[in-house]
Amino acid sequence: MNIRIIKENLVRRTMFGLCLFVFSLVFLMAFGLYQKSKPILAIISLKDLLFSSIWHPTQGHFGLSSFIAGTFWVTAIAVIIAVPLSILTAIYVSEYASKRVRSFAKPIIDLLAGISPIIFGVWGIIAVVPLVRDYLMPFFTKRFPFFPFVSDNYTGFSALTGGIVLAVMTFPIIISVVEEVLRTVSFEIREASLSLGATKWQTIKYVVLKKARPGIIAAVILGVSRAFGETMAVLMVAGCALGVFPKSIFDAAYPLPALIANTYGEMMSIPLYDSAVLLAAFILLIITALFNMAGWGILLHIERKQACG
Amino acid sequence: MVRLRSPQVEENIFIGLMIASTFIVVSSLILILATIFIKGFPALNLDMITKTPKGGYYLGKEGGVLNAILGSLILGIGATFLALLVSLPLVFYLNLYLKKNSKLALAARFSLDVLWGIPSIVYGAFGFILMMFFGLRASLLAGTITIALLIIPIMARSMDEVLKMIPFELKEASYALGATKLETAIKVIFRQALPGIFTAILIAFGRGIGDAAAVLFTASFTDSLPYSLFKPVATLPLAIFFQLGTPFPEVQQRGYASALILTIIILCISIFSRILSGKFTKHTIK
Amino acid sequence: MEIKTHISVKNLNIWYGQHQAINNISIDIPDKKITAIIGPSGCGKSTLLKSFNRLIELQDGAKVSGKVLVDGEDIYDPKVEVTHLRKKMGLLSQRPQVLPVSIYENVAYGPRIHGIKDKKKLDEIVQRYLIESNLWDEVRGRLNSSASKLSIGQQQRLCLARGLAVEPEVILGDEPTSALDPLSAECIEQRLLELKNKYTIVLVTHILRQAKRLADYIIFLYLGNLIEHGPAEEVLNNPKYLKTKNYLEGKFIEEPKINKELNLKRTAYPNNFVTAKLALGDLEFGHIVKIIVDNESSAIEIPKAIEHEGHKILEVRKLNQNDWEIVVQKHNGGYVI
């Protein structure tokens, strides 16, 4: 009889331990990466690291600013493309679409979420690079010969290419969160609006979207964070040329995650190189963790408010 | 928002935009799959999946990517197993042992959400640090552990969704017979949630074998078949990455074929889990 | 008639967060009898029942104070193994909740976790209790098929068999027939009547006729308060207090309008009775007085004496650890000219 209780208690302790482990994993990661990036912070100030654009590991120059700019470009492009498309899709799927369309579109969006980043990269190389090189870039440079469309990078491997591929990769997360949020807007409140003679679109625009606004903001934040940290696909299509400070959507961009990924192999052979790269990883971790805390925090708040009635 | 004369016109414009957006989103997946199939299929042959790279493979000589296929599967299975060891007890703890409004459960769920959003390259870097800390080389073991860390949040969150939906009365029925929480978890809840748990495992597995950034530092790459936990291992995503990185068209062709293989594997997993999930469709990504 | 007590509740209070669901209840539940807990919905019937096997602890924010003695042992003692307790108290819930395993495994589940591994013994147990719950003939050929495929009435009988298989001493029924069709309900009632020779049965029900059919002993709760309890005959046919009477007649239960309050704490019987009698004398006919006393003997004796005087006792209720409340209506019958 008692052995059951002992077993129960033992398992309870183990489970509690696992719970603490998961809870502390973020901190553990931050701590580890910070420890490893300390050596470089001891020699070069954080300001110099963040704002200098000179990257010459062999000569001890570790300026990250062009990588940060690259990250900014691809993320911004991805968000500008993905956010309106995703939100409109989510509204359509959850409010307007017939059951048949829904049951067709939902699995596809889920499937999109499950596809390997590498596959997106391959697709980017096959389809998006030529699109940008042969159509978009000539079109834009001819019609809009000013910032941010002027570039001398004619390869097609550019910030825009990375942004387009990233946009497709961020669709699923934004769509599924927005959809979830729209679903939490109660039926009664829609009914109230409809019963006052509002059309369906007016109801959505003035009532549903207003109620869902914090959730939609959360979805966008999570989408940004996803785009921000994506590595392999961007590495494959964004150009990733050293020594280029991107000034145009058609310039090659070299975002932080790609930098980290590209240093495998040579990282340990140059002094401080590993420290600089792990600092980049640390920055990436902090920013994505903060974004995710904000996003999930908002969603959690909505959920709890919902639960209380 | 734009003010138009008639609400009906405005509604129609927006419906048009929404349909267009949905079309773009849905067709992007179809486009991706179609591209991979069209480019990859001609280069796909039996050698690709039955041979390992021979000398000069990356210069266009013969061979296949069996090393990477096997490596990915083994690494994926190992990581899924490790992640399961953590996730399953964890979600049982959250749903059975802790009260609904427990602060600890809230903190753990929030941590999982945040972990879920951390990019895989950061997991890779962290895995690299762990590796150095424990004096390991880039190896199957290090790669497996890193991928396990990466997929724990994915697996645990999906399982959590499943367990949350289990009616309280079912637990009550078991407790009322004098069962402990552990017995209830293993004999009752597990049985009830099995399809959902299985789906969660498959989702995590798919994510695990598809990831490249996390194994870049930790699993390295090799041309030989995986045979030791402590030796580097090849993975399919990296094989694709390297083949596409070469300047030789015939090697790039094989890269496309490898991409097709990976896509087919992931599609199979997806479809299989969809069939299994049946009514448990909620626990995809939230 | 000598009544042996099986479950003894002493000063039980239960809160859900801020809301008090059970308000200082003390009561004895007789051994090997059917005790029905009746009252309008939301009055704490299920809460009281679930406090007997400590399932109440699983509710969010539930807090329990007071004692529940089963066989003289306080089940809320930290030393008590809750699994052992629950084995002793079988539960039959509102909706039958079968476990997601086969019919056989449903019944064998309990004995198995309590240590019976012998296959032959398990077979025997499964058969015995399926027979006892009158399900054997219907399922003997398909013991290994899924329990969820049974009809809802069969499921409830399966739940009964499953509960009996752990050899409980008490059966707790939480409106066990409310989700069933009339035939299945009758079948369950029949089983319960047969089982009362062997088990103490506590039944929550909101169906008065069911209480009449089954119960030997009645507990009437209203808004978390114990209003009246006693042998079924007495309570159902001849309720002492107004609230019970109104409930049994299907009328609204109202709080009586108190015209006068008498605080007779710190005085003993019969002194306080004399004070009360004098106060009643000053009152108009039909008016209501609330008397508060702080010892149990007064709470028992004063109502008797006042009734003897010809007045009407509307309610006697324990307020807290020490205080009792007696609500009396001045007789408005024959005396009125």
Image: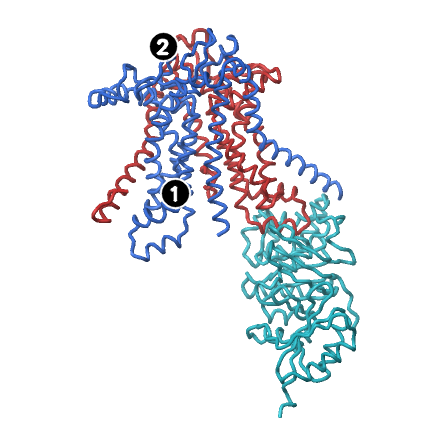
Residue C248 placement (x, y as % from top left): 60, 74
Label 2 crowd bin: few (<14), some (14–19), many (20+), radius 10 Å: few
**Secondary structure beneath disc 1?**
helix
Residue carrying label 1 = A213
- Please give the letter of the chain rendered in red: B
In the figure, B74 relative to A308: above or below? above
Residue found 70% across the figure and 37% down from its top: A10
Residue A2, given in percent of the width and then of the height, sits at 76, 42
What amino acid type is highlighted by mark number 2?
Pro
Task: Name the kind of residue labelled 1 in the image.
Answer: Arg
Circle 2: element type: loop
In the image, which lettered chain appears cyan? C
How many numbered marks appear? Answer: 2
Residue shown at 52% from the left, 32% from the top: B153
Residue position marked by numbered label 2 in the rendering: B247
Task: State how the image is colored.
Answer: by chain
| Rendered-image quadrant of the N terminus of chain C | bottom right
Could you tell me if residue C133 is visible in this image? yes
